[in-house]
Image (tube, rainbow, N blue to C red):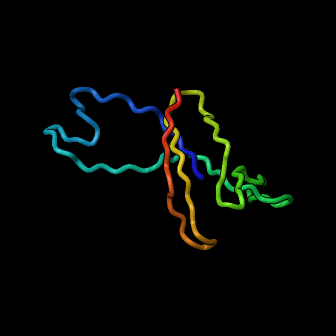
Amino acid sequence: MKSSYTNVPAAATRRQGRPGWAQNGSQRCSSYSLPAESKILLPKLPPPYMYADRKPGVIEMSAYGSFAAPLTFAKDKPGIYTIVCWVKKAPGEKSFPATEVCVRVE
Protein backbone atom coordinates (compact mmCIF):
# COMPACT_ATOMS: atom_id res chain seq x y z
CA MET A 1 0.00 0.00 0.00
CA LYS A 2 1.32 3.43 -0.88
CA SER A 3 0.24 6.73 0.67
CA SER A 4 1.25 9.88 -1.25
CA TYR A 5 0.92 13.58 -0.33
CA THR A 6 0.47 16.70 -2.43
CA ASN A 7 -0.60 20.27 -1.63
CA VAL A 8 -4.22 21.29 -2.06
CA PRO A 9 -4.54 22.59 -5.65
CA ALA A 10 -5.17 26.30 -6.06
CA ALA A 11 -8.42 27.38 -7.66
CA ALA A 12 -8.12 28.27 -11.34
CA THR A 13 -8.66 31.89 -12.30
CA ARG A 14 -11.08 32.88 -15.03
CA ARG A 15 -8.12 33.42 -17.37
CA GLN A 16 -6.72 29.92 -16.66
CA GLY A 17 -10.04 28.23 -17.38
CA ARG A 18 -11.04 24.82 -16.14
CA PRO A 19 -8.27 22.25 -15.56
CA GLY A 20 -8.04 19.85 -18.48
CA TRP A 21 -9.75 22.24 -20.91
CA ALA A 22 -8.22 24.56 -23.50
CA GLN A 23 -9.18 28.25 -23.65
CA ASN A 24 -11.51 27.61 -26.60
CA GLY A 25 -13.52 25.07 -24.54
CA SER A 26 -12.16 21.95 -26.21
CA GLN A 27 -10.71 19.23 -24.04
CA ARG A 28 -6.91 19.04 -23.99
CA CYS A 29 -4.79 16.07 -23.03
CA SER A 30 -2.80 16.24 -19.86
CA SER A 31 -1.06 13.59 -17.82
CA TYR A 32 -1.22 12.74 -14.15
CA SER A 33 1.12 10.79 -11.93
CA LEU A 34 1.24 10.06 -8.24
CA PRO A 35 3.14 12.58 -6.13
CA ALA A 36 6.82 11.83 -5.51
CA GLU A 37 6.47 12.24 -1.75
CA SER A 38 5.06 8.96 -0.44
CA LYS A 39 5.18 6.31 2.24
CA ILE A 40 5.11 2.56 1.56
CA LEU A 41 3.14 0.39 3.99
CA LEU A 42 4.07 -3.32 4.05
CA PRO A 43 2.39 -6.44 5.50
CA LYS A 44 3.36 -7.39 9.04
CA LEU A 45 6.00 -10.09 9.22
CA PRO A 46 6.03 -12.72 11.98
CA PRO A 47 8.66 -12.21 14.70
CA PRO A 48 11.64 -12.14 14.52
CA TYR A 49 11.55 -11.19 10.79
CA MET A 50 11.92 -7.57 9.63
CA TYR A 51 12.24 -5.66 6.37
CA ALA A 52 15.51 -4.01 5.27
CA ASP A 53 14.52 -0.81 7.15
CA ARG A 54 14.47 -2.89 10.39
CA LYS A 55 10.67 -2.57 10.74
CA PRO A 56 8.17 -5.49 10.88
CA GLY A 57 5.47 -3.90 8.65
CA VAL A 58 2.06 -2.49 9.60
CA ILE A 59 -0.61 -4.10 7.37
CA GLU A 60 -2.65 -6.75 9.21
CA MET A 61 -3.56 -9.63 6.88
CA SER A 62 -6.35 -12.17 7.52
CA ALA A 63 -6.46 -15.77 6.36
CA TYR A 64 -9.44 -14.82 4.17
CA GLY A 65 -7.59 -12.15 2.20
CA SER A 66 -8.85 -9.04 3.93
CA PHE A 67 -6.43 -6.49 5.34
CA ALA A 68 -6.29 -3.40 7.54
CA ALA A 69 -3.66 -0.70 7.95
CA PRO A 70 -3.35 2.41 10.10
CA LEU A 71 -3.27 5.59 8.04
CA THR A 72 -1.75 8.71 9.50
CA PHE A 73 -1.68 12.12 7.86
CA ALA A 74 1.76 13.31 8.90
CA LYS A 75 1.84 16.77 7.36
CA ASP A 76 1.02 19.79 9.50
CA LYS A 77 -0.73 21.51 6.64
CA PRO A 78 -3.74 20.93 4.37
CA GLY A 79 -3.22 18.58 1.47
CA ILE A 80 -4.44 15.66 -0.60
CA TYR A 81 -3.43 12.14 0.41
CA THR A 82 -3.72 9.50 -2.30
CA ILE A 83 -3.82 5.93 -1.04
CA VAL A 84 -3.23 3.18 -3.60
CA CYS A 85 -3.42 -0.52 -2.84
CA TRP A 86 -1.08 -2.51 -5.10
CA VAL A 87 -1.77 -6.26 -5.37
CA LYS A 88 -0.39 -9.29 -7.17
CA LYS A 89 -1.54 -12.90 -7.42
CA ALA A 90 1.74 -14.53 -6.47
CA PRO A 91 5.32 -13.64 -5.52
CA GLY A 92 7.35 -12.68 -8.58
CA GLU A 93 4.34 -11.39 -10.53
CA LYS A 94 3.94 -7.74 -11.45
CA SER A 95 1.86 -5.64 -9.02
CA PHE A 96 -1.09 -3.58 -10.24
CA PRO A 97 -3.15 -0.82 -8.58
CA ALA A 98 -6.36 -2.49 -7.34
CA THR A 99 -7.93 0.61 -5.80
CA GLU A 100 -7.24 4.27 -5.15
CA VAL A 101 -8.80 6.81 -2.82
CA CYS A 102 -7.99 10.48 -2.33
CA VAL A 103 -8.52 12.14 1.04
CA ARG A 104 -8.47 15.91 1.48
CA VAL A 105 -7.04 16.88 4.86
CA GLU A 106 -7.77 20.38 6.17
Relative side of 97 to 30, left or right: right
Q: Is residue 39 left or right of residue 100?
A: right
User: Which residue is the extreme one toward the left?
Assistant: 24
Q: Can you give x and y, in whole percent of width and height, for residue 92 in the image? A: 61, 73
Residue with the most extreme front position: 64
Q: In the rendered view, would you say 77 is above or below 3?
A: above
User: Of residues 62 and 48, which is closer to you in this image?
Assistant: 62
Q: Is residue 30 above or below residue 86?
A: above
Where, by quadrant of the figure, is residue 74 drawn?
top right
Q: How many marks?
A: 0
Image quadrant where residue 91 sits: bottom right
State the residue at coordinates (51%, 57%): 98
Compared to 9, does 29 lie above or below?
A: below
Q: x, y (%) of residue 68? A: 66, 48
Across and down, in percent, residue 78 comes to 52, 28
Where residue 94 sits, quadrant-wise, is bottom right
Q: Residue at x 50, y 53 (%)?
A: 99
* Residue depicted at x 61% and y 47%: 39
Question: x%, y% of residue 81?
Answer: 52, 39
Q: Is residue 98 left or right of residue 19?
A: right
Residue that appears at 59% across and 32% down: 75
